[in-house]
Image (spheres, helix red, strand yellow):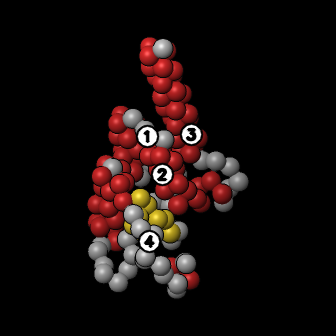
Amino acid sequence: MDLKNGNPSFVAKKGHFVVYTADWKRFAIPLEYLSNEIFRKLFKMSEEEFGVSSDMPIRFPCESAYMDYILALIRRGIAKDFEKVVINSITTGQYCSISASSDHGYACATCLSWKLRLNSELQRQKQTRKVKGKGQA
């Protein structure tokens, strides 16, 4: 179901909506993510960059690797302060592009920076859970 090759699929399974990324990868996103500030920003940017069309799918102005990353962050329940960092990277265009990493055979500095931030945030959350768990014992 590839829009790039002329086979669009706008229909999502129940409880999801469909978006495409700038490199035309299809994502079925849970409806509860509509209230997420990151997705609200992506929708606004999509409208500004691509417009609104009834015969074309919603297309976000980021590449699929970055969308995978955003979805992983949301699934893990990122903190609000880290959410602001993600939104800032979207609005300033400082997110990883596929060409920046795969065409040259190395990870771009932005990807590495994001991975470090994510790991740091996940470690912080893990520590917070441990402390809360000890306090309840």
Tell me the quadrant of the picture where the N terminus can be found: bottom right
- Measure how far apart labels 2 and 1 are at the Cα level: 10 Å
- Using the rendered image of the protein, determine whether residue 134 is visible from the camera's viewpoint: yes
Q: Residue at x 43, y 77 (%)?
A: 10
Q: The residue under label 3 is which amino acid type?
A: Lys
Residue at the spot 41% in from the left edge and 64% down from the top edge: 16
Residue 12, labelled with which disc? 4
Distance in Å between CA atoms under marks 3 and 2: 14 Å
The quadrant holding residue 59 is: bottom left
Residue 82: percent from left, percent from top: 40, 36
Q: Which is nearer the N-term, disc 3 or disc 2?
A: 2
- Which amino acid, by three-letter code, is at mark 1? Gly
Residue 39 seen anywhere in this rendered image of the structure: no
Could you tell me how far apart the alpha carbons at marks 3 and 4 are, in whole angstroms?
30 Å
Circle 2: residue type = Leu
Q: Are there few (<14), some (14-19), or many (20+) residues within 10 Å of tag 1?
A: few
- Dot 3 or dot 4: first in sequence order is 4
Label 1 to label 3: alpha-carbon separation: 16 Å
Which residue type does callout 4 highlight? Ala
Residue at label 2?
A: 71
Q: Position of residue 117 (x, y in %)?
A: 51, 35
Residue highlighted by disc 1: 77
Residue 76: horizontal and vertical position, in percent? 48, 41
Q: Nearer the viewer, residue 26 or 106?
A: 26
The tag earlier along the polypeptide, 2 or 1, is 2
Closer to us: mark 1 or mark 3?
Answer: 1
